Amino acid sequence: MDEDGFGNMGENMKSLLMDQEASARSDAGIIVMSMFFAGILIVAFTTNPIASGTKIGERAPIFSGDAYDGSSWSTFEFEDLLDSSWTWNSTEDAPWIAVEYMDTACGYCKQSAPDVGEWAQMYRAEQWPGPDGIFIAVAVEFVADSSITEVEEFRAQYNNNFLYVDDLDNDIAGDWDVSATPTYFLVQPDGIVAWNSGQATNSLGWDAKEEQSTSLNGFDDGYVQLNEAIEQLTLLNGGE
């Protein structure tokens, strides 16, 4: 074979080796990508994501707004109250959150305001054996026109020494599926709804340990008040 023939053979061999190397890399890449997507599918089918919503067991919608503390209005972030590391047997002093939706023109809100004020003072860790409770009122406008001034006056009249969040445009209430007042929620420290007064049967609460609903004891008529839900659920899931 002449010199040109050997040269062509060498080039052909070199080209063949390069093609084989490229093919091997491509096959390896396909295998890696296949494993990656298989992993995603496994996670997707084996993980049970928690839905966002206000039914018990769902993750409460995050909200923000201007809040009144009795002297001034400032930005409030609901998420700042949450502790994502909390579990049913946590021993840290993570507070539970009681959220009240109220309207300054709502007669039932006026009737219950003194009780809510007392409960906000009562359920503090230094005064009772359960974990601390934080109360928040979200002021909406369902019954009649209201104003920031009326919200401030309502809070002062009933001595509710907790934050009042401005939701007079009802945006937050919409996210929380609230259409009537008063409506109450009890939220675990990790943001999971433990109790909802607006449920058809509000004698059910959320058992964080079992991750399922549980009947609150002693309420066969299906009606539970906020303080009763606080006492049972916080002690049930408040740590050991």
Image (cartoon, rainbow, N blue to C red):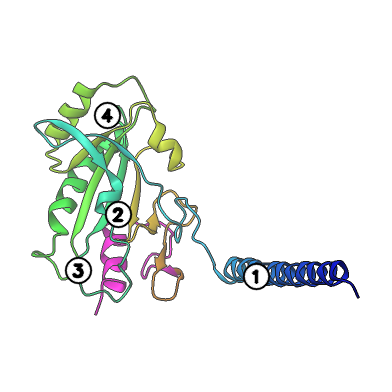
As drawn, the residue found furthest toward the front would be 2
Mark 2 or mark 1: whose residue is earlier in sequence: 1
Mark 3 or mark 1: whose residue is earlier in sequence: 1
Q: CA distance from mark 1 to mark 4?
A: 55 Å
Tags 2 and 1 touching, CB below 8 Å: no
Q: Label 4: few (<14), some or many (≥20) within 10 Å? A: many
The residue type indicated by label 3 comes to: Gly
Instruction: Kindly identify which numbered label has been placed on residue 30.
Output: none
Q: CA distance from mark 3 to mark 1?
A: 45 Å
The residue type indicated by label 1 comes to: Ala
Mark 3 or mark 2: whose residue is earlier in sequence: 3
Q: Which residue is mark 4?
A: 104
Q: Label 1: few (<14), some or many (≥20) within 10 Å? A: few
Mark 3 or mark 4: whose residue is earlier in sequence: 4
Q: Position of residue 170 (x, y in %)?
A: 39, 30
* As drawn, 69 above or below 198: above
* As drawn, 210 above or below 146: below
Q: What residue appears at the point 21 percent right and 57 percent down from the top-left corner? A: 133
Magenta highlight range: 214-240
The answer to whether residue 230 is magenta is yes
Instruction: Kindly identify which numbered label has been placed on residue 130.
Output: 3
Side of 91 where 210 appears, left or right:
right
The answer to whether residue 191 is magenta is no
Q: Provide the secondary structure element on which disc 1 rests.
A: helix
The residue type indicated by label 2 comes to: Leu
Instruction: Kindly identify which numbered label has been placed on residue 226.
Output: 2
Q: Label 2: few (<14), some or many (≥20) within 10 Å? A: many
